[in-house]
Image (cartoon, rainbow, N blue to C red):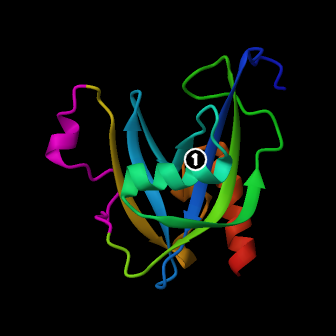
Amino acid sequence: MAENAITPTHFNIRVYGILMDSYKRVLLADEFIRGMYVTKFPGGGLEFGEGTRACLKREFMEETGLEVTIGEHLYTTDYYQQSAFKPNDQIISIYYLVTTAEPINLATKTTLFNFEPHQLADPKGESEVFRWVAFNDLNENCVTLPIDKIVVTLTKEKYK
């Protein structure tokens, strides 16, 4: 654990999916959450009584409307990562490769954080849009979160 880190009191388990389409593009989520702009892989928090694969299927359905098939496990956080949003939480992120039937019927944007006007008017101040990034253009700078940066490298190595 880092020297100045707060001692964690809770685990926050997150499950994410790497979805690549037939055009060799990877799906990313651009979010405005808790006052921060974040680009990450689609997915979210594990609920009590839920398995990691069921969590990811649920998260994809809730966020994108896509029914995904959960494939190979790619990575689980293997070091201490403090939550950016809740300093007392230790983040554990689990990543799977996912597939879905094509053509993929999902509204996406082509530019970073291109939210719809109704999303910007959300009183909770949270918004999410999806964007495809060409596999060849995918790099650590495409994502915000430190664990996602590791997963970008692992994904590039897996599919090179």
Q: Residue at x 31, y 64 (%)?
A: 108
Helix, strand or loop at label 1? It is helix
Q: Position of residue 12 (x, y in %)?
A: 65, 30
| Residue 118 is one of the magenta-drawn residues | yes
Q: Is residue 78 left or right of residue 67?
A: right
Q: Quadrant of the N terminus?
A: top right
Magenta region, residue range: 106-123
Front-most of 37 and 97?
A: 97
Write down the residue under mark 1.
55
Looking at the picture, does residue 144 appear above or below residue 25? above
Q: Is the stretch drawn in magenta largely helix, strand or loop?
A: loop
Looking at the picture, does residue 140 appear above or below residue 126? below
Q: Tell me, yes or no, if residue 41 can be seen here.
A: no
Residue 13's image quarter? top right
| Residue 78 is one of the magenta-drawn residues | no
User: What amino acid type is highlighted by mark number 1?
Assistant: Cys
Residue 159's image quarter? bottom right
Q: Is residue 123 left or right of residue 132?
A: left
Q: How many marks?
A: 1
Q: Position of residue 57 (x, y in %)?
A: 53, 55
Categorize mark 1 by other alpha carbons within 10 Å: few (<14), some (14-19), many (20+): many
Q: Residue at x 37, y 38 (%)?
A: 32
